[in-house]
Structures are given as structure tokens and as C-alpha cells.
Image (cartoon, helix red, strand yellow):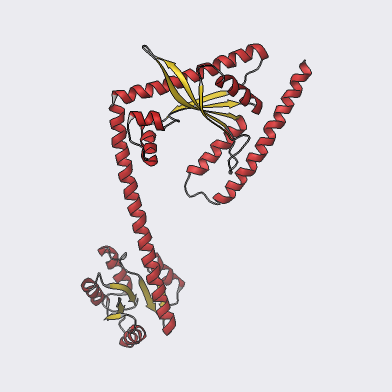
Amino acid sequence: MQRILVVDDVEVNRELLRCILEDEYAIEMASNGIEAVQKLQKFLDETAAVLLDLQMPIMDGFAVIAELKERGWMHKFPILVISGEYSIEVENRCLELGVSDFIHKPFGNSVVRNRIKNAMELFFTRNQLERKVQEQAEALKEQNEIIQIQTEKLKQEKSFNRLMMEYHSVIMEVETRLKVLNGEFSQEYNRNPFEAIKSRLKSPASIFEKLERKGYPVTLESIRENLTDVAGLRVICSFPDDIYRLAELLTKQDDIIIVREKDYIKNPKPNGYRSLHFILSVPIFLSNEKKYMNAEVQFRTIAMDFWASLEHKLKYKKNVDRADEIVGMLKDCAVSIEALDYQMQEIRNKIDRSRQ
């Protein structure tokens, strides 16, 4: 049977609580705070709950709570105050100190049993959850430490640094080809097909984490074979038709190979995300060889890119209030952005036709 400690200086109250609870619990009793602490020291691991009076000689209930806090025992069992005190201030003070519940005198049999049962269940559930969170935090910390160690090892590998140089080279190669097309458009059509190019090289920590998460070995060959987004570029265009025209001109170059294509403009993701994605295999020219490297290239309009940056913040920011409502608002915005992009494109077309 679970053990409950009843602490009250009035014998009648102790005996009354014993009669209410003895069929379900093993009852220990103490007439003051000092005796209570001694009993808890003896039955610390067996105690399931403490019923504690506040007004007692020698050592009152508040002093007992302070002693339990100092000894680090408050996390071991719930404390329920048994008192004739109905002051909101006193009750609030007890709750702030970590008391689980109040049982007011005079005692009602079913109220006493239910409050104790609920307090014990909630206390146990909370402790279980806290332990699980702590275990997960420790596991995550350990995993991050492993990632850091492996990342440092990768950084020190000459062959890894060369691989990163090659991925950086493919970024420069794609950027150069896009800038050439941009310059040609500027001369031929007096306008530019894109507004900006943003590029990024995946960090060693991100590379290691993704390989681990996907279950791939952490080797240079594994990076080449299994990760297609180490080198990434985002091309920001003004209008949807610029996206398709520029993407076609780039991907039709005779030495570029399309590994994968996903059109999230014509087929948006459920959350409203729109973009044109390519995994391209592009040649780079080194001192002694020509080598093909993968690069992820995304094409978006200015409005699509603004939407995606806002959605990214929501995705990776924790504890956002009313997150479901924001997700719905973002989806509505994505629909509006699509309509606006095509309206602006039509306005541009009318302006261009009026110049002819």
C-alpha cells in the first residue's frame, strides 16, 4: 500500500484522517513539524503524499515546507495542506511554495480521498513528463556534442575542405551563368530576368546532422551521393514568366544535367509554398579535371520569397501563440500572392505592348 504521512497537532484530526484513508493507504502520523521531518527521513522513498497542517507548535507547516525544500524532497511527493484557514492570501502563498492542493476542515470523506488521488496522479504524471523532458534534453545535448566533435574532425580533413571548395565552385559557376543571361537580357530586351541571387554552402554541422538523421554513413562519398543541397542558390525574379524563361535558358545549356525538378508554383505545397526547384549537375573546371557537382537551385518571385522567409520563421520558432491561426493566414496570403504576381505580370505586359 502507498504510504501517506498525516501531520497535525490535533489528535482528533489525525485519527479522523486515518479512518478515512486506512482502507486504501498505509498511514503514518506526526503531531508537529520536527516529528514529520523525522518520519519522512525514515520513509522517504515509500511516502506517496503528505497531508500537512499549517498551525502547529514547535515547527509549523511553513517551516516544514522550507525544510523539505532545503533537503530537496519537494519533488518526491505531493503536499496537501489540511487547514481551517480560508484566506486567499494564505492559500496562494502555499501554492507558490509548491503545495499541490488544499483540503479544508471540516473533512468530507469523498473530498479527502478524491483530492489525494488527483494530487498523486497529477504529481506522478508531471514528474514523469519532467523526467522525459530531461532525458530528451540530455540526449539532445549528447547528440549535439557528438555533432560538434564530428564537425571539428570534418573541418580538419583536407579532403573535406577540398570537397567544400568544389561545392563553392559550383555555386560560382551557376551564378556566373545566370549573370551572363542577365546581361544578355539587359542588352536585348532592356530589362533583367531576375532581381537577385542568394547562395549558401551547407555548414559541416548541418551536413553531419542530415547524414545522421537520414541514416547515411558520414563519409565524403556519402555526402556526394546522398546530399543534393550542400550547394544552394535562390534566384529571385520579378514575375512568374521570368522564372520559367530563365530556368529554361539555364537548364537547356548543353553541359547542364537536370537531376530532379519540382514545380511548386503550378503545384503548391499544402501550406501554400510556391517555388520552382531544380537539382542540377553542373561542371566545374579544376586545374587538372572537369568535374560535375550537384547544386540545388530555387526560383521564386519577390513575393514568394518574402512569404517563404516568414513561413520559415514560424516553422523554426518555438512556442508561437495561435500558431494554427497563423498557418491559415499564411495559406490565404499565398493565394493572394499568386493572384498579385500574375496581375503585376499582366500590367507589365500591357506596358511592354504599348511601347511596340
**Residue 217: x and y, percent?**
33, 36
**Residue 261: x and y, percent?**
54, 30
Residue 75 lies in what quarter of the image? bottom left
Q: Nearer the viewer, residue 72 or 256?
A: 256
Residue 194 appears in the picture as rendered: no
For residue 248, above or below residue 105: above
> Which quadrant does the N terminus fall into?
bottom left
Residue at horizontal 50%, vertical 22%?
A: 257
Residue at horizontal 42%, vertical 71%?
A: 91
Q: How many marks?
A: 0
Please state if 278 lies on the left or on the right of 97 as rendered: right
**Residue 182: x and y, percent?**
59, 16
Q: Nearer the viewer, residue 286 or 187?
A: 286
Q: Nearer the viewer, residue 264 or 122?
A: 264
> Which quadrant does the C terminus fall into?
top right
Q: Nearer the viewer, residue 233 or 93?
A: 233
Please state if 151 lies on the left or on the right of 274 as rendered: left
Please state if 203 lies on the left or on the right of 30 as rendered: right
Residue 332 lies in what quarter of the image? top right
**Residue 218: x and y, percent?**
33, 34
Residue 274 appears in the picture as rendered: yes
Residue at horizontal 36%, vertical 66%?
A: 124
Residue 35 lies in what quarter of the image? bottom left
